[in-house]
Image (cartoon, rainbow, N blue to C red):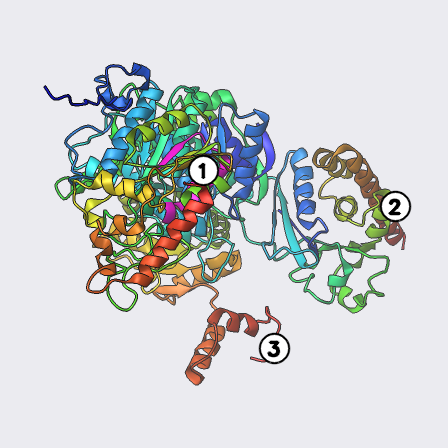
Amino acid sequence: MFGVRIHGRGGQGVVTAAELLSLAAFEEGRHAQAFPSFGSERTGAPVVSFCRIAEREIRTREPVSQPDALVVQDPTLLHQVDVFGGLRPDGYVLINSTHGFDELGLGEWTRNFRHERLLTVPASDICRRHIGQMRPNAAMLGGLARLTGIVTLESVCSAIAERFPAGLAERNIAAARECAERVAAQLGASVGA
Amino acid sequence: MAERAIKFYQVGSHAVGNRLLDPALATVQSDAERSNTITKGHRACQGCGEALGARYALDAAMRATDGQLIAANATGCLEVFSTPYPESSWRLPWIHSLFANAPSVATGIAAALRVKGHDEVRVVGQGGDGGTADIGMACLSGMFERNDDVLYICYDNEAYMNTGVQRSGCTPPAARTMTTQAVGSEPGNVFGQGKNMALIAMAHEIPYVATATVAELRDIEAKVEHAMSLRGARYLHILVTCPLGWSCGSAETIRVARLAKETGLFPVFEAERGVVSAVSKIRRRTPVEEYLKLQGRYAHLFKPTRREDVLAHVQAIADRNIERFGLV
Amino acid sequence: MLEQLEGSVAVAHAVALCRPEVIPAYPISPQTHIVEGLSAMVKTGELAPCEFINVESEYAAMSVAIGASATGARTYTATASQGLLYMVEALYNASGLGLPIVMTIANRAIGAPINIWNDHSDSMSQRDSGWIQLYVESNQEAIDTHILAFRLAEELSLPVMVCMDGFILTHAYERVDVPSQEQVDRFLSPYEPRQVLDPSEPVTIGAMVGPEAFTEVKYLAHVKQAQALDLIPELARELDGVLGREQGGLVRGYRLQDAETVIVALGSVLGTIEDAIDQQREQGVKVGALGIKAFRPFPLQEVRDALAGAARVVVIEKALAVGIGGIVSQDIHIALGSSATPVHTVIAGLGGRPITSASLTRLIEGALAGELAELTFLDLNAELVERELQRTREKRRSGPHAENMLRDIGVVAAGPV
């Protein structure tokens, strides 16, 4: 079972992100469970959502406290909320930011983890160009797919197409693809290095 | 032989048994084929205005709907005296659920009939002033707002009579009840703004609102028949004398109700979609004292001392109604 | 057909398949998505013939349901928490009149303090109302159990509430198999009432019943619920045949065969418990679980049989009988009768506090080590409570308890007290 935790703020589509991810897994014929953290949901307040993916029926209902992968949609959360709590030693992290981990003040922290699995991607910029909005939820899933391989990029795009109305879906898919490319480029670079 | 002039008087057209009257105009009660919707054997008090009003109203509704009628009844006098275990007076399908929900139950019945395609079956919801104006107000307002196809009839005896005469939102000022007793410097019920249920119903802009009293029984029938010719939410507020709670003679039921209208204290009118459409004028304007002195619930206004201040205050209310509704 | 759906939406589909005729609805978190879904289906004509009525309160919702059901319409509504309490008078009225209304309870805590998250205090507070109560563990079970509920209600002329954990199930997206209309029609025929308001055959419903017969009327309700003990498994088997999957009956055991410790629970927490049990079993610990699906009527015999071999029983409860402790455990005690099996009550998950497998593991270990008290509050912050008690000892006007404690844990901005 693979557990993903998504952090963001109210209004950024954090809950939808988890649902899309679960839909992507479903379309691959797997079991997936997505749910929000049930806090007070006000625009701007920190929000957490969870997605579990497995080959068999998922029975547990507790929050994902030891995620295999973390998605941080809003970097302003980094030093406000414990977004990294419980992350597995070989876990993945994808942060929406134009800066790298060192610049974000996380360089020291990354030493406990596998640094090639910790990436940032400028999802907000990408979304502004493709969608016109800065809601990076769907786009980052493209990056997550490429980073972790837990679902394919095509499944993510298919889920977006199913969930969003036509025009919006296309633009989000484009953003997701670019996020995936950016991630792939970084992975290629780190492998080379 | 001395001549004496003999005057022949034409008996009023609506008198029961008038053979000159077109049968279509005759009161439902004069019809041997009437439904007797609430039939004999119930346990109402002698002279009960509610039993009288309900009989006239429901038989008229049954005739207007060709017997295709279902009733939802709130807890209260009517419900209790009509269904003394193990008997029931009701000859139509009838349900009693709770005190506050008769309008909602009626809504549910109407919805079920609609869904099953039984357009011809109609629904009446009924309750007393307590169950309608107080505890049932939210449900009533909801039914009005949705314009559910229900005729709701409130039998207003101006207090919670079934439980032993306690004050309701419809209890008139100065009236004695067990929770507004005739003691202290301000005996009886307080002078508030009142709660005019007909005006409240009108504010919901429903198709038809009317008031009536048990002094004009043919009027009740006519208003019910008219109401049943319409669809949507309709409200009928009937003043029903309670000889026990009002402490008047059981033979005074109709006279007391008539005086409530003739003094102006109980305006009788009709309204459609929020606008008054007809007013029943007062025939002979009467001072409120004529009405109040017939009822023990106002005895403290006359003995041991006459409360001129209170009487004047009540008269002012009547005068305001007369002016406001154009009753003379 | 397999679909990835939000729990509420899945339930809306299941209810729609049952061809309800009147749906009165009033919104309350966390059931709103259910009635929203149904309202859209009625409006588009996807669900027809059906009257969807936006009522002005939950009291009105149940009252409209009473009127509709008494007129022979298949009737459904949904509520939770405060809404359930607001309709209590009507709840008892519906069961007392024997009306086969089906209602979803999206289990949510009852205030004060106001709390929108999950626990079982709402439905537990109505366990004596005469309604049949079924608790579901997953959204698949929610779908199947609603279908069962309509049939059960109509066969017994008793109302049924299907309890599903608010947010945890209602707002979880997961894979479910939604039955086809043909499958549901095979299991659920049109409603044929035992009593109905019908001008061609007038009846009086709801008359006063005095001391002469009241006891007998109530006893009959008790008898009907007892009939449900046989009917639920029977209908479940029939539904198994139609849907091709196992419904389970009144209770469901998990790895009970040689279990020395048995954990009893209701609802979605059973999933987390099963995972924890698998981990324990890998270490050779003989632990199992008993999920209770039918809470009313309470399946005394099935529970007795399931717990027969247990050396200890741990009851995890998402509700609290203030002043005494457990609610479910009281019924467990009755089932165990004079047997000396120790029963440990664990109050957990109140107000939506997550029940984690880590906590469950600690709990099981504590039980095995004989360290578990008769009554435990899982993950209780005792220090927080003590600090508030200290405040009350120091000052008469110590302030509202909840706000004081929230300030302590930093949820409310600290300011001058």
Chain to which mark 2 belongs? A
Q: Is residue C79 left or right of residue A119?
A: left
What's the distance in space between the residues labelled 3 and 2, CA to CA?
44 Å
The residue identified by callout 3 is C415
From which residue to which does the magenta span run? B133-153
Q: Secondary structure at mark 2?
A: helix
Front: mark 1 or 3: 1
Residue B205 image position (x, y, % from top left):
51, 37
Rendering coords of residue C54 (x, y %): 50, 38
Residue holding disc 2? A129
Are discs 3 and 2 less than 8 Å apart at CB? no
Which disc is residue B143 wearing?
1
Residue found farthest to the front: B1
Can residue C239 be seen in the rendering of this structure?
no
> Marks 1/3: CA distance?
47 Å
For mark 3, name the chain: C
Q: What crowding class fits label 2: few (fewer than 14 Cα within 10 Å), some (14-19), or many (20 or more)? A: some
